[in-house]
Amino acid sequence: MKKPLLVPLVCAALSAVLLVYGFFVPDQPENIGTAQLSVILPDWRGTDTLQFKQGIQAAAETFGVSVQMHTAEANLPVAGQMLRWIEQWEISPGVAGLILPACDSETAARALDAARRKNAALVAVGWALDGAACVRDDPRAEGAALAEAARALRADGAPYAVFTGGAESLERLEGVKEVLGAPAFLFGDAQPDAFEALLRPLPDGCDVFALSAELTDALAGLGGGRVRVWGIDPGEARVSMLENGGAAGLLMRMPFAQGYLAVRAAVERTAGEVRAPVRVVTRETAYLSENVKLMFPLLQ
């Protein structure tokens, strides 16, 4: 049964209040331990960065470390600011690790060199960096998670369609195929003005996997209710997309977990890659307590 309109309105209002509060919380929390980590916050949109910070702060309390966070100043080149922060980290006594988002090759090389000289932990978040621990998403596992969610509603052997665009979506396709076999319909790099025509001949009840956020945003609702669209979190449109049936389910990343795992990797000096968890959310599960903070990220 569809939730009353009041529920998302209340959640949205509380999110707005917490957003104002969260972004004015000082970046440098109280020192709670002897070991110190330095974190350069990723340039993510929306409230993902706030969730990431909350995950870092939760891990800092768990592992008894203090964390110094760096937020980019507006209207200044981010790469230059990152290099400056790394230089400061390099000469700071007692700072045992650096958590670094995706950056250019010069910044990455400087961070690796500084980490080696300090014998300190370096953790890359959201990307692969040789010589550093990496906390990353797993696109193949994301595709498999979407397919598993869809399989509960499918008849065995029923055809399905996939829309891809970009290397990451092709990795997700491999995960979908692991669960459901090869797709009957595969559309690669199709243009948005062709989507409606491509959906028209698909059989009623067909599952359609839109394997990027952009494709999800473009395809949701175009099937007129004849097909089920499974996609990647499109951002602000996620709630309305599930509520109005434009998408049957959305793959939600968990920035809180990424922040927590990054601190743990730095403290434990984890080698290699750590894969961050994801979750598929449907209209029926969107308001469960474990999913509300993903749909309304500021409600922790």
Image (tube, rainbow, N blue to C red):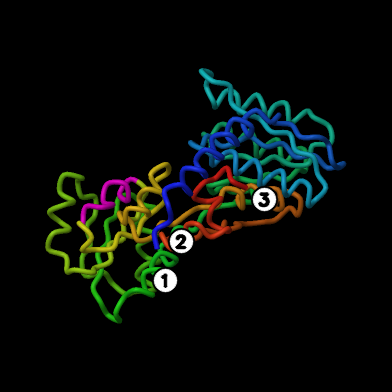
Does the magenta-highlighted stretch encompass residue 198?
A: no
Label 3 neighbourhood size at 10 Å, few (<14), some (14-19), many (20+)? Answer: many
- Say what amino acid the circle numbered 2 marks: Val
Magenta span: 214-223
- Work out whether mark 2 precedes mark 1 in sequence or the reverse, and give the earlier one: 1
Q: In the displayed image of the protein, which residue is found farthest to the top? A: 75
The spot of residue 205 in percent (x, y) is: 23, 69
The spot of residue 23 in percent (x, y) is: 61, 31
- Say what amino acid the circle numbered 1 marks: Glu
Above or below for 175 versus 236: below
Instruction: Name the residue carrying label 2.
Output: 280
Disc 2, SS? strand
The spot of residue 167 in percent (x, y) is: 36, 52
Number of the label disc, if any, that sits on residue 148? 1
Disc 3, SS? helix
Q: Nearer the viewer, residue 105 or 265?
A: 265
Instruction: Name the residue carrying label 3.
Output: 260
- Say what amino acid the circle numbered 3 marks: Tyr
Q: Quadrant of residue 22?
A: top right
